[in-house]
Amino acid sequence: MDDDKITKELFEEYVNVAEVELSSEEADSIYAKMNEQLKVIHQLLSIPHEAEYDPVIHGNPYPAEIRMPLREDVWIPFEHPEDILAAAPRTSDGYIVSPDVPHQKLV
Amino acid sequence: MSDLTSLTALEQAKLIREKQISAVELLDQTLEQVKRVDGRPGSLDFDHETEEDKHKVHAFIILTEEHAREKARSVDERIAKGKSVGALAGVPYSVKDVYCTKGIQTTAASKILSGWKPPYDSTVIEKMDQADAVMFGKVNLDEFTFGGSNETTAFKPTVRNPWNTDRVPGGSSGGSAAAVAANEGAISLGTDTGGSIREPAAFTGVVGLKPTYGRVSRYGVIPFASSMDSLGPLTRSVSDAALVLREIAGFDPRDSVTGKVSVDNYLEELKKGVKGMRIGISQDYMQITYMDDNGEYASAPIDPVLLAKMEKAISIYKELGAEIIEDIPMPNTKYSVPSYFVITRIEAYSNLQRYDGLKYGHSTSRPVTDMYDLYYKSRGEGFGYQTKLRLLTGLFASQEKFYEKYYGRAMRARGMLRNDFDNAFNPQGKYRLDVLLTPSTPSAAFPFGGATAKDSLKMQFADQFTSPMNFAGTPGVSFPCGLDNEGMPLGLQAAGYDYCESKILRAAYAFEQATIDEDWRKVKPMVLK
């Protein structure tokens, strides 16, 4: 379990990747809480790797007779795009306005 | 006519269809009841809790009076002209504030969605409108449904339990449960990812139905964990739950997990009773199982009063002609809490990525250097503590290096939990169950702060008997079974197999009818006295 312990450095990296600003009080509390919660997650380790059940993404099965067939790949425009734009904090000429998107080099 | 708000939805609809009351009259009485018991609505502008706040329910975030009045008038006009109306014509209902409602604010009880008015209705809202039900308000919840007590909402005051306003209403559909228990509408629509309909239903003495995954369309409902989210009604009677399910269930081309399976007439099915039904009891649902500080599985008993209620229910079912099958093995129940923890946080992390301060909802007013800074600041200001915790835990658990260790195991555990249900309900198997009877929760509603938002581990054990059904994708209904020694409601759960809602509703209805004259049913919530 200790090898999964979340260090302060890792925690700060997670906060950046998650793109969510934390107050110092929140950061201290969430950092401690996440390490505490590892105990619960670790209960899963009692399930053997070789357990006979495959991982499943849904509990109940979707046999072909009840499953929705794949749709045609057709673009259906929303009837009132102005309603979508009305919800955006900043718009101009029918577009949502964003601050600069900095260029990022993939390492 | 005297108090209409304590009637069931079926009774209200009948009176309206027979022109004994009007839909507008019923709406007026319902809104009056909200004024009487609810207190101020949940708001982001909350300053502090007053003494008066502590004695009110606070189920609602917003009342949609104008919208409701227009619908009620339209129902009355059509009835007056002899035109046909839907099965829920004129019946007021509320909805958990995660259902998108066209042109009406939808917050998920989070600041990040403040001011957002969706440009479309969810499928279920459309179906309720086709049934001519009258939506009159949107109710509070744990932020993004993350919790089991309603304490994580950003819209304060927090919802209080109508039976004892010092207790939590449960969650996350706590506003729905509290509203229905306090006669603020006979129906409320909730969502259930690990017990979020059934737990608050048990805590507030109402009926809460989580249908089969895929039975009710999720389209237009703000997601928590998409592989487990289910939608259903909270009502004061089993018949009302059956009626609402009939109206909202069915295939929806806009939700790919809805199945092309015919919808039963659940209301008619109730009359079939439980004679000959095979009802199972599992010891794995009669105790809480957890891992102790030494890493060993330990167990704790459920509330002894609740145990007595279970035993009484078993004897009632026997008298009604059901066959009780004991010792049903559900050995993987113990994995539900850790699996829930991992899967739901990973899916929540993914679902929360859409909130960016750019497209809708809260956007920081502070200067930003670039788009990423906008995300960072807007999400920091908009998300509450529990949302941030789940977001970061989901990010941690979803790392590729932990795939097999955590996520893979959790998905394997889901298969194992499902297998428990397959074995128990297999019509050719050893047990051949129609219904599995369990407590809905290990105890009655706890006091505020007893399992606070910051102690989500403790809170999640309240879901140990309900989250397995979300993994298995199977249905469950919580129904009131009595009161504990402090006068708080307790609930039992009838759980079933895929698309077998009729059977679990029959079991709940049979118990309800067999106990309809018992003294505990005459006891009313504190706020109604």
Image (cartoon, coloured by chain):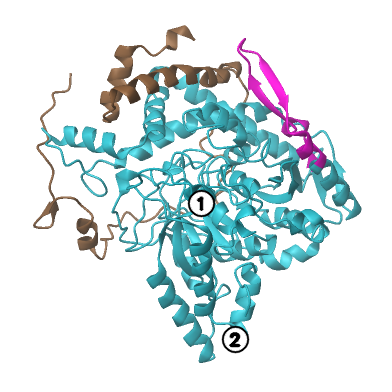
- What range is drawn magenta here? B280-308
- The relative height of residue A1 versus residue B268 in the rendered view (above or below) is above
- B249 vs B377, nearest the viewer: B377
Q: Classify mark 2: residues with Cα within 10 Å, few (<14), some (14-19) or many (20+).
A: few
Please provide percent x and percent y for residue B258. 51, 53
Question: Residue at 51% of width from left, 71% of height from top?
Answer: B133
Q: Amino acid at mark 1?
A: Gly
Question: Does B305 lie within the magenta span?
Answer: yes
Question: Which chain is cyan in the picture?
Answer: B
Residue at which label 2 appears = B19
Can you give x and y, in whole percent of width and height, for residue B254 in the image? 42, 57
Which quadrant would residue B397 be assigned to in this image?
top left
| Nearer to us in this view, B164 or B505 | B164
Query: Residue visible at 65% across and 62% down?
Result: B242
Residue B319 drawn at (x, y percent): 91, 53
Q: Is residue A74 left or right of residue B372?
A: right
Chain colored brown: A
Q: Is residue A50 above or below residue B51?
A: above
Q: Secondary structure at mark 1?
A: helix
- Residue at mark 1: chain: B
Residue B64, percent from left and from top: 40, 66
Quadrant for the N terminus of chain B in the image = bottom right
B189 over B450 or under it: above or below: below
Q: Which residue is mark 1?
A: B175
Q: Distance of mark 1 from mark 2, alpha carbons?
A: 31 Å
State whether residue B132 appears in this view: no
